[in-house]
Amino acid sequence: MTKSELIDALAERRDFSRRTSEHIVNVVFGAMKRSLMERGRIEVRGFGSFKVRQYKGYVGRNPKTGQEISVAPKVLPVFKVSKNLRAQLNDDLS
């Protein structure tokens, strides 16, 4: 599902205009982004949680040339699916 499809689904389900739905989705994503940028954690019960994980720098290799490359430290968002959602997805496979 894309952001545009999410906006359309919200507009259809709640009889909002597309513009209102777009504003709501942008506010929610903006709040989530700000929380992660402040190194916060986001938890959506029954869906999963987002948090920021810091990775140390390391020396890697270019697989093509074998030359050593210094990889800088980085910060990345990480998503962990909830047990409930994981169970529902696996039940659908049965």
Image: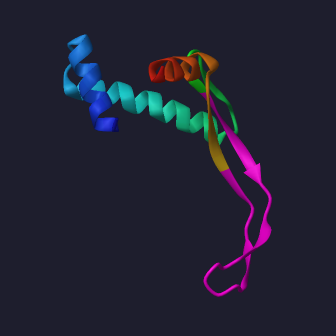
Q: Residue furthest top?
A: 14
- Could you say where residue 5 lies in the image, as x and y percent from the top left? 28, 33
Asked whether residue 79 is drawn in magenta, I would say: no
Nearest to the observer: residue 41 or residue 59: 59
Magenta residues (range): 49-75
Nearest to the observer: residue 27 or residue 5: 5
- Could you say where residue 75 lies in the image, as x and y percent from the top left? 69, 52
**Type of colouring:** rainbow
- Could you say where residue 8 lies in the image, as x and y percent from the top left? 24, 27
Q: What residue is at 58 percent from the left and 15 percent from the top?
A: 84
Q: Residue furthest front?
A: 94
Q: Is residue 89 above or below residue 32?
A: above
Nearest to the observer: residue 93 or residue 33: 93
Determine the main secondary structure of the stretch shown in magenta.
strand
Q: Is residue 56 left or right of residue 36?
A: right
Quarter of the figure with residue 39: top right
Q: What residue is at 28 percent from the left and 24 percent from the top?
A: 21
Asked whether residue 50 is drawn in magenta, I would say: yes
Quarter of the figure with residue 12: top left
Nearest to the observer: residue 21 or residue 3: 3
- The answer to whether residue 22 is visible is no
Q: Is residue 34 above or below residue 82?
A: below
- The answer to whether residue 33 is visible is yes
- Quadrant housing the N terminus: top left
Q: Is residue 21 left or right of residue 35?
A: left
Q: What residue is at 72 percent from the left and 45 percent from the top?
A: 53
- Could you say where residue 48 lies in the image, as x and y percent from the top left? 59, 25
Q: How many marks?
A: 0
Q: What residue is at 46 percent from the left and 33 percent from the top?
A: 29
